[in-house]
């Protein structure tokens, strides 16, 4: 009888354990079958800064991500701001970072990641929506995540202890899920990421404010960019006032005439997946950016000098390529005339066009507007003061330097800071990432327009450009 009771007890315990396991399995599967809806923001500016574009599906697990600065404080004494992420007071996440649950909460990028900047004028920080994220070093951030994920200091217990210390303890279910599932999955994902990023180690570092989306795409397609030396690093562009650009070509080399495809390809390059792409979210941002005005110059403008500068601008013919309504605006100037660094244009070959034509196949947005060019697009100069460093590869630190002969331009300069030079019109970095124009893809030659002007006319032209 006692043995029978003991057997019944063990069977009951086994039944409970099986039931508990089934519940946990079903719960975890429920979480992983499909993503939860993205967070909604009533204010479109908040949506731009923190909304989802669908990039979280392959994102880093949020509950681990938020503890990394604590676990690796020797490397990140300032947290994610050390990579140039901007943090608003009262916000848990940096600008440009979204969180969404897919199995577990994951972090992703959005449009604001690469298109929000902060300039410092007279000690006063000014946040600029739609500006190139000049302080953000995405490459360094990605490399940190990979290295941290493979560091023996990153363990489930280290994450749990950090979370407890910071007043955000893990639930018992999350502890089980992270210890036995999430960490194992993370190890697999990082292993694949290491291989797909091998090409980075064979090229000059991008530095803050730049990225090489072309080689990210090539790695994604299995084109083995690690086996060649093609460089496609370019500056993040500004994205305000998109309405006046709709009739032209997009991307630095003018390889696409569709604003919609440009937006989708940028989102996909930022981590969005083809099957989880948030069309309505991206379209909401795109509609807002169509009429987002450029930021006003943060200093005083000598209006008399600027008026003289406008006359010089007209006489020199700058508006033929850069004025709204000009025939050449939004068109591509061939390298034979422009003579800037050819690396980005060389990278985007007819083979790239062929692969891009398959992006979105089976979905509602299959690409059909890509082309290869042999030059760079003529862009409007709205808000040009906030778009430095200049040229497509960010190889010229300020507008004053751009008006010098290429041989007299800065061969090495720091970039990645918020300080701004009101006179030379561009970032004023005394430390940071040292940019070297002798490295592949970094050449600062070309665009010699205005370089023959006398110094007083250059000064007047700069004053005019400040107000555009």
Image: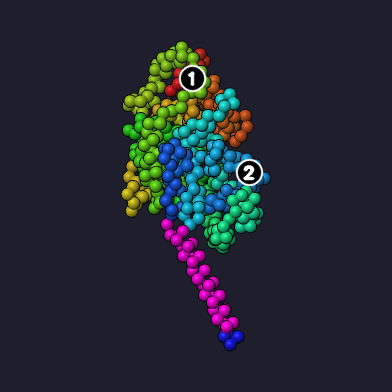
Verify whether residue 33 appears in magenta.
Answer: yes
Which residue is rendered at x = 45% and y = 30% of the image?
339
| Residue 8 in the image: above or below residue 196 | below
Which residue is rendered at x = 54% and y = 72% of the image?
17
**Residue 211 as seen in the image, left or right of residue 277:** right
Q: Using the image, tell me which numbered label, if any, was put on residue 244.
A: none
Q: Secondary structure at mark 2?
A: loop
Q: Compute the Cα span from label 2 to label 1.
A: 39 Å
**Residue 385 as seen in the image, left or right of residue 357:** right
x and y percentages locating residue 396 in the rendered image: 52, 29
Which residue is rendered at x = 35% and y = 25% of the image?
324
Number of numbered callouts drawn: 2
Front residue of 198 and 44: 44
**Residue 221 as seen in the image, left or right of residue 156:** left
Q: First in sequence: mark 2 or mark 1?
A: 2
**Which span of residues is magenta-colored?**
5-34
| Residue 464 in the image: above or below residue 242 | above
Q: Nearer the viewer, mark 2 or mark 1?
A: 2
x and y percentages locating residue 390 in the rendered image: 49, 29
Verify whether residue 375 appears in magenta.
Answer: no
Q: Secondary structure at mark 1?
A: helix
Asked whether the viewer can see residue 159, the reply is no
Front residue of 390 and 61: 61
x and y percentages locating residue 257 in the rendered image: 34, 38
Front residue of 337 and 356: 356
x and y percentages locating residue 160 in the rendered image: 62, 55
The residue indicated by pointer 1 is 462
| Residue found farthest to the right | 74
Find residue 183 and report its image quarter. bottom right
The residue indicated by pointer 2 is 76
- For disc 2, the neighbor class at 10 Å (few under 14, some 14 to 19, many from 20) is some
């Amino acid at each position: 009888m006692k043995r029978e009771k003991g057997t019944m007890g063990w069977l009951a315990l086994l039944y409970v354990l099986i039931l508990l396991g089934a519940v946990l399995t079903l719960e975890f599967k429920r979480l992983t079958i499909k993503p939860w809806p993205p967070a909604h923001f009533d204010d479109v500016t908040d949506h731009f800064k923190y909304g989802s574009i669908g990039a979280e599906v392959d994102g880093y697990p949020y509950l681990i991500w938020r503890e990394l600065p604590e676990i690796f404080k020797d490397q990140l004494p300032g947290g994610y701001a050390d990579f140039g992420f901007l943090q608003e007071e009262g916000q848990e996440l940096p600008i440009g970072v979204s969180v969404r649950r897919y199995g577990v909460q994951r972090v992703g990028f959005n449009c604001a990641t690469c298109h929000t900047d902060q300039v410092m004028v007279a000690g006063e920080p000014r946040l600029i929506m739609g500006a190139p994220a000049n302080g953000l070093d995405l490459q360094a951030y990605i490399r940190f995540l990979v290295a941290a994920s493979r560091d023996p200091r990153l363990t489930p217990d280290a994450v749990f202890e950090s979370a407890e210390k910071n007043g955000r303890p893990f639930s018992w279910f999350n502890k089980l899920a992270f210890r036995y599932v999430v960490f194992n999955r993370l190890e697999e994902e990082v292993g694949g990421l290491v291989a797909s990023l091998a090409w980075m180690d064979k090229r000059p570092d991008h530095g803050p404010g730049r990225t090489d989306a072309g080689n990210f795409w090539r790695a994604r397609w299995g084109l083995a960019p690690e086996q060649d030396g093609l460089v496609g690093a370019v500056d993040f562009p500004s994205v305000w006032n998109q309405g006046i650009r709709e009739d032209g070509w997009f991307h630095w080399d003018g390889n696409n005439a569709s604003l919609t495809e440009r937006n989708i390809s940028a989102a996909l390059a930022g981590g969005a997946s083809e099957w989880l792409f948030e069309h309505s979210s991206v379209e909401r941002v795109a509609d807002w950016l169509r009429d987002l005005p450029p930021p006003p110059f943060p200093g005083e403008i000598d209006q008399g000098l600027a008026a003289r500068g406008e006359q010089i601008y007209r006489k020199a013919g700058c508006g033929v390529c850069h004025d709204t309504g000009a025939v050449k605006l939004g068109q591509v100037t061939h390298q034979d005339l422009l003579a800037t660094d050819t690396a980005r244009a060389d990278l985007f070959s007819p083979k790239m066009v062929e692969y891009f034509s398959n992006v979105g196949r089976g979905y509602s947005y299959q690409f059909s507007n890509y082309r290869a060019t042999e030059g760079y697009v003529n862009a409007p100069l709205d808000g040009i003061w906030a778009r430095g460093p200049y040229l497509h590869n960010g190889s010229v630190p300020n507008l004053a330097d751009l008006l010098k002969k290429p041989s007299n331009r800065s061969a090495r300069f720091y970039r990645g800071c918020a300080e701004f030079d009101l006179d030379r019109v561009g970032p004023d970095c005394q430390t940071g990432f040292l940019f070297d124009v002798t490295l592949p893809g970094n050449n600062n030659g070309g665009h010699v327009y205005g370089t023959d002007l006398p110094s007083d006319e250059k000064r007047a032209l700069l004053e005019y450009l400040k107000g555009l």
